[in-house]
Image (cartoon, rainbow, N blue to C red):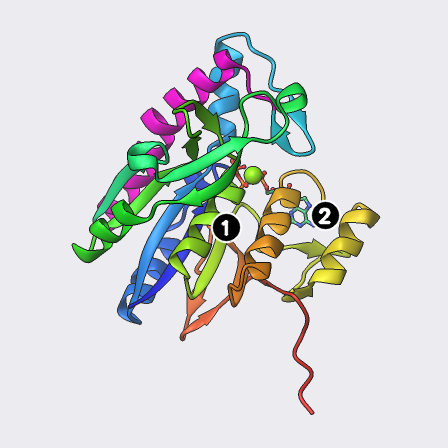
């Protein structure tokens, strides 16, 4: 069976539309099985504020101290994951929430302890648990935390975690659902961007902030052999008449001779 990985941005979880869930049901009807990885930026920042901790970002990644990591896990696992699982269930889609540290699902190593603290790079994905759930027709909803070889917990950027899980499952499509309809260039949503264009628009400052880890992990996913990566809106229908809507990112557009 073909699989679609959807990274659901924390930016849009509270704004997911009924049309978004209709698109998910359409995908299931078209024969795809679904796997989710979720973010949770706004929920984490809200809790950090309550706890009096200032969020710090370095190259779009959240600097994570031991204190921040505890808050991140509490919020992502205890609040954001629950919210998404409940929303899916409410729309008739059976979902089960799991944590990237369950059964060493996401194996990671520290990227740059000095500047980022307890933030990990995905080394390997153990997809056994995901397959077990998919076999029973459950939608796995994964919280992006990982563990090191010596069982230390790490915070993993959700976009990178999504791309790594997508690669391990050899998915048909990897989609990043977020609070915009796609990548906006010169004021308009681009329907297709090649790798060179993405790099150029980052340098030009048209692709910034939270869009950077998204496009970077999208390009890494394409490098690892995935066919399609898309940025789609969580606020609208993104799949209609068997067509995905948003910005598709490709390595290089095929030239038809
Ligand atoms: N060229 C661009 N086109 C569209 N959005 C862009 C662009 N450059 C930067 N962005 C920003 O990227 C944001 C989406 O990334 P963001 O990290 O905020 O959300 P998310 O990844 O969906 O949520 P979370 O990080 O909580 O999982 C958009 O809301 C927009 O502000
Ligand atoms: Mg983000």
Work out whether 117 lies above or below 163.
above
Indicate which label's residue lies in the foreground, 1 or 2: 1
Cβ of mark 2 under 8 Å from ligand 1: the answer is: yes
Hey, which residue is sitting farthest bottom in the picture? 257
Work out whether 78 lies above or below 15.
above
Q: Is residue 33 visible?
A: yes
Q: Secondary structure at mark 2?
A: loop
- Would residue 227 appear left or right of 252 to someone viewing this image? left
- The answer to which image quadrant residue 185 occupies is bottom right
Mark 2 Cα within 10 Å, few/some/many (few <14, many 20+)?
some
Where residue 178 sits: x, y (%)? 52, 47
Q: Which residues are magenta?
A: 63-92
According to the picture, the residue beneath numbered tag 1 turns out to be 163
Residue 80: say if magenta. yes
Residue 64: say if magenta. yes
Hey, which residue is sitting farthest top in the picture? 52
- In primary-sequence order, the first of circles 1 and 2 is 1
According to the picture, the residue beneath numbered tag 2 turns out to be 207
Work out whether 55 lies above or below 186.
above
- Would residue 131 appear left or right of 214 to someone viewing this image? left
């Amino acid at each position: 069976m073909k699989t679609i990985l959807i990274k659901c941005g924390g930016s849009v979880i509270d704004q997911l539309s009924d049309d978004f869930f209709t698109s998910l049901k359409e995908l299931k009807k078209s024969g795809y099985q679904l796997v989710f990885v979720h973010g949770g930026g706004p929920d984490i920042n809200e809790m950090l504020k309550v706890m009096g901790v200032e969020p710090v970002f370095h190259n779009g990644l959240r600097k994570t101290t031991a204190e921040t990591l505890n808050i991140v896990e509490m919020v992502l696992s205890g609040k954001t994951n629950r919210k998404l699982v409940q929303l899916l269930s409410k729309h008739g889609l059976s979902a089960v929430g799991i944590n990237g540290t369950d059964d060493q699902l996401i194996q990671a190593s520290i990227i740059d302890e000095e500047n980022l603290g307890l933030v990990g790079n995905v080394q390997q994905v153990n997809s056994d648990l995901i397959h077990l759930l998919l076999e029973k027709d459950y939608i796995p909803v994964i919280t992006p935390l990982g563990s090191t070889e010596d069982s230390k917990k790490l915070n993993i950027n959700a976009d990178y975690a999504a791309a790594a899980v997508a690669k391990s499952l050899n998915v048909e499509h990897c989609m990043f659902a977020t609070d915009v309809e796609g990548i906006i260039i010169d004021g308009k949503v681009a329907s297709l961007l090649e790798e060179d264009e993405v790099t150029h628009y980052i340098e030009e400052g048209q692709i910034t902030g939270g869009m950077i880890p998204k496009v970077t992990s999208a390009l890494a996913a394409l490098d690892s052999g995935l066919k399609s990566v898309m940025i789609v809106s969580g606020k609208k229908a993104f799949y209609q008449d068997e067509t995905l809507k948003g910005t598709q990112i490709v390595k290089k557009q095929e030239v038809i001779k």
